Every structure is written in structure tokens, then in C-alpha cells.
Image (spheres, grey):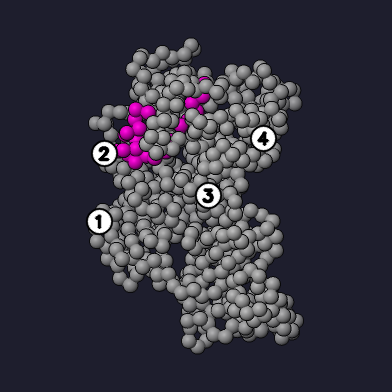
Amino acid sequence: MCSTCAAPLTVPACITAWKTSMWRSLIAAARGAGGRSVPWWRSIIASARLQAEQPVGVEGPWAQSRRMFLLHPATPPWAVPDATGLHLVLLSDQPLPAGRVFVRSLPDNEELLTPLQPDGQEGTLQRWCAHIAWDGGHGLQRYCFVVALEGAAPGDEGRLQWLAADGLHAELPPEAVHFRHHRHGQPPAWVRDQVFYQVFPDRFARGNPAPFVAPPGAVASPWGAKPDSCLGQRQFFGGDLAGVTQQLPYLQDELGVTALYLNPVFQSPSNHRYDTSDYTQVDPLLGGNAALLALRQATQARGMRLMLDAVVNHTGEQHAWLQQHAGWYARDAEGRVLGWKGHGTLPVLDFSVPGVQQAVYGAPDSVLRRWLQPPWSIDGWRLDVVHMLGEGTGARHNARHIRRMRQAVREENPQAYLLGEHFSEATRWLQGDQEDGAMNYHGFTTPVRGWLAGLELAGVRQRLSTAAFEAWLTRAIAAIPYANQLAQMNLLDSHDVPRLLTELGGDHARLQLAFTLLFTRPGAPCLYYGDEIGLEGGADPDCRRCFDWDRSHWPMPLWQHVQRLARLRAQRAEWREGATLTLDQGDDWLAYARYTPQAASVVLVNRGAATSAALPLHRLPLRPRRVQGWQGEAVAVASGVATLTVPACASTVLLLDA
């Protein structure tokens, strides 16, 4: 209770009275210390101890005898928004002293400490609660926690333990790793529940029974032949949208796919179609608009989602805009039209031009709006090289136009998904006001390749230690709101990088490890067509081989592993929406948990020799009634610790149900 107004200290209205009281104590403590200057937050917390009567749950003087474990899952029910702010829960494995546990927030850019109050237990963990008011000046709410561990005497600086999104800190953590929640900019909730499947239309399946005829100047190759780098974008294999529609039973009923992401489908002279010549027409080689409508209707009938590829940073050189609206394109100092990365066939649009803004996202029949409207009603857009989009010759005012794109998309469909392509870090685009998620190369693909293949995406050798791997994953999650992390598209492969199996030298055991990570880490997994059957391929265009529909060629243990993971993800809510906690790690293995209040999954991935690990289940905020392996096997649990054994280069999952 507040000593000034007798209201609970967690009520925002009492913060002013509490702060006044703290400052009075601070002044008194400073005088008692002979005027010695101490950091402001340590003085406040030290003075708070003078006001605390007795540490909650502790008899006698309070002492810290071992490293404290603090936990704040930044997802409901431990972080719940309401009309006035956020209800927050902090968990600890030790009793904490009343009056010395705080949440630090930044309303109107001013630091504010709000005390937390004890609120019982969750599992074996102590529970502390507080409510912080929304930051009136920003949509993005940032906060962290602090516990004063020592400092019994006035003016004693004591010892502090801070908790931020990346873990424990001995000093005030930088705001870049504070927990964050965007008040308004939440991604569509359906995204986290999906298993995406990326299709390169020319190479997945052919549904048209008529002989394929390549367009003038192009080459038709037989299905299954290898892509020829000399032919490049002129080589066609005849895959089409009818083929995708015909394979929906395979994708959904057998494999467990729930959402499709199609590489560009609009009219274009190339096989990759990133050089659009008409945004209003699906390429006739793919079956035209009628084929896309048939696919959309079939996915809707099955409850599947459909996302298309928007290439609006540039057009193709055959687009009518280049002749009709020459002023819409960026130009160099000599007045020449700029090509994306120097490619003259890909002229770059200048978003400082109002006509470009209207044509791409502003007008009712603009590119982004048109295909979100009936009868197409697609579920979202993947924005190609969106970080490069902007005004003039560069990415000037990039964020402004992405925010406007987000607004336009949401006006057509409030639940539409906006996904950005970023090979490097996408943190600044993922703070809740621009993209919902990104193709998660930075936070997933690159570290996974470094840990399992010893490679960076550009082919540079960088074998990651397990500690560096875990730190990379944790750091990437900490940098964005957790809701956006759940909407990230995690991927092992894409049309732009060599297949992981090829980088692994054909090692299927390591690829299975990668699939376990793909389906159990936070974010929506995306399979690149053929991943599940061990399709190989080097750099573009080799990574775009034809899907092999001869099942006698499929490595069934690999395929069945993917199928089992997809089914478990559909069954286990914690894989889709749960918080994430690293439990332990060794030289070659990592163990982490995904959890909700009702259930948890403990995942152990091991790239080395056979190993055993004792994992602290007592750190999870639930009391499980049932604990078993993912194949139903019994697991030894004693005093809240589970002992798991995993073979060489393998993974296992422990399932807990409360």
C-alpha cells in the first residue's frame, strides 16, 4: 500500500506519491552518506530498503547466497495489455524483499521505477506483479526489471540484478535489449500458427497436360534437368499454378503445410519473374488470372493461407510505365534510369513521385490493394528488397513508405500479413509500426548455417560455437517485440541461397537437426519446395531445381521427420505461441524450452557425439502432470530435473503437460 494515499503501489495514480516519497528518502540517505554522490537508481533502491519492513518469504536478514534466476516471458499471461497499460509478471527462483523489486519504464522518455508486489507462485517460482501505464509519446513500450540484492545502510550503493530481454545484467542494460511491446502494431495472430511452403512456380509441378512451349527467345528444358547457368533466366521447365493446385492434398493432408508463399507470378519475360511487366496480369505461362483464382478458391476451401510476392522496388524493363511514365523512375546524375544493383533490366522506381505512390499502394486499384480485394483476397504480401525502396537514388524515407504500405494493406484487410525480405538485420523494420515479420535470415538462417555447416550465407567460413549460436539467437529475439518474433518467417533455404543439404555435404542427420530447430524455435517455419525430400542445389540457379515427384527417390526418414514435426506443431500450442527459455548448453548441444502456462516442450539438439544432459524443468512456470518423450517414451525426472540422453547428431523433444 502507498503510505501517502493508501492505494496499491502498482496503481499508476500512486506513482507520483511514491516517487515523492522515494526522493525524500533519497535526500535523507544522501545527507547520511556525507553528501557522497551515488547513481540515482541505486540511491532510490537503497532508500526503498529502509522503508521495507521484512523481506517477503524470508526469516531474518535477507542474503543472496547464489546466482539469482529471474524470468519474464514477454507474452500473455505474463505480459497482458489493457486500455491503460501493461500488466507484467516477474518470476524468481528465490524469495525477493518487498520494496526492492522494480520495473523500469520510459513514459515520455522519462525513467520511472514502479515497484512490483508479491503475487503467489507459478510452479516452483515466486511471482511478482506490476502495472505500467502506456507511454503517451510512443506506440512502442520499453521496460526492464531490477532487483536490489544488497545495500542495508543509507548511501550503500549495494548490488543490483537487472533483467532485460537478452537475460541478466549487473548494470543497467542498454535500451536496445529492453523488453518491448507495441501498443497498436500487432501482427496478425494467424501467422504464428502456420507452416509455410515456398513455391518457385516454374519448378514445383506442372498441371497443364498440354506440351509446354517456351516463349520466344527462351528455352524449354525437360522436367528434372539441371538448371543451366548459361541459360539463366531464359530457361523454363513449365511449372504452373494448376500444378500447385493439384498438389494441395500432398502439401496439406500429407506434409502438414497450412500456408503458401509463391515467388512472383505476374507477367514477366523471365523464369524468376522479378522483372514484372504487368502487375495486373498473372503470367500466361502459369495459367493467367484464372489459374490464380482457381488456386485461391482451392486454398480457401481448405482453410489455407496464400501470400504473393510484391516486387515494387523496381519493375522490369518491359513494363509500360517505363514508356508512359518515364518520370516515375530514379535516374543518375547523367539522367540515365538506375537499374537495381546495376541491372538495366530492373529499373528502380522513385517513391518521391506521387504517381508511383498511388500506383503501388495509394489508389484503390494499386498493386498492393488490388490483390487483397475479392475475388483474389490473398492473405498477405512478401515485399522484395523492401529495405532498398525509397525516394530518389537510394532508400531515403524508406520507413515512411513502408508505414504507408502497412496502412494501405490493413485498410483492405486488417489481418493481412506484411513480410519483408532482409538478408541482414531487420530490427528497425520490426518494431510494430512497419513490417509484421521478415524472412528471418539474420535471426535464424545465418546462425543455423554457422552452427551446423560452418558457413555464413555468403559462403564465408564461420563455424559457430554453441555459446555463440545461442547468444546470436537470443540477441535477435531480444531486439524486437516478441509478438513480431512469433510472426517471423524462419527458413533454412530459399530461391536466393544454396540448399542447406548441399552445404552440409549431403548429411541428412544434420539436416534433420536443422528441421527440428526450424519447427521449434519461435517464428513460423517455412519449407522451401523440396526441402522435405532432400532436394539439393548450389548457388542460383542451381538452388531452383525441379521437384522430383518420383517417391521412390525420396529419403523417407527425412520426409517423415518433417511430417512429424509439422503434426506436433499443429498439436502443441507452445510451439506456435509459447515463450522461449534456454535451459542449458554444452560444447555441441543446446537445450531450450517453449512454454505456456498449460504445457511446455523441452528441445535438445546435438551436433556432436552422444550425450546426456540434466535439464532444470523447475525453472518453467508450470507444474506438469505428465512428462514424456516425443515418441511416448518415459523420462527420468527427479527434484525438477530431467535427464535426457540423445544420440550423436540427433535431437529429441520432451513434452510436459500441466
Q: Which tag, 2 or 4, sits closer to the chain's start?
A: 4
Quadrant hosting residue 339? top right
Task: Look at mark 4 in the image and give the residue it sits on.
Answer: 390
Marks 3 & 4, CB-CB < 8 Å contact: no
Task: Look at mark 2 in the image and give the residue it sits on.
Answer: 556
The amino acid type of the residue labelled 1 equals: Gly
Q: CA distance from mark 3 to mark 4?
A: 23 Å
Q: Residue visible at 46% across and 20% down? A: 288
The amino acid type of the residue labelled 3 equals: Asn
Compared to 517, does 532 lie above or below?
above
Report x, y in % for residue 104: 62, 66
Q: Which tag, 4 or 1, sits closer to the chain's start?
A: 4
Task: Look at mark 1 in the image and give the residue it sits on.
Answer: 632
- Magenta span: 245-267
Label 3: how many residues lie within 10 Å, few (<14), some (14-19) or many (20+)? many
Quadrant hosting residue 164? bottom right
**Does residue 425 appear to the left or right of 302 in the view shown?**
right
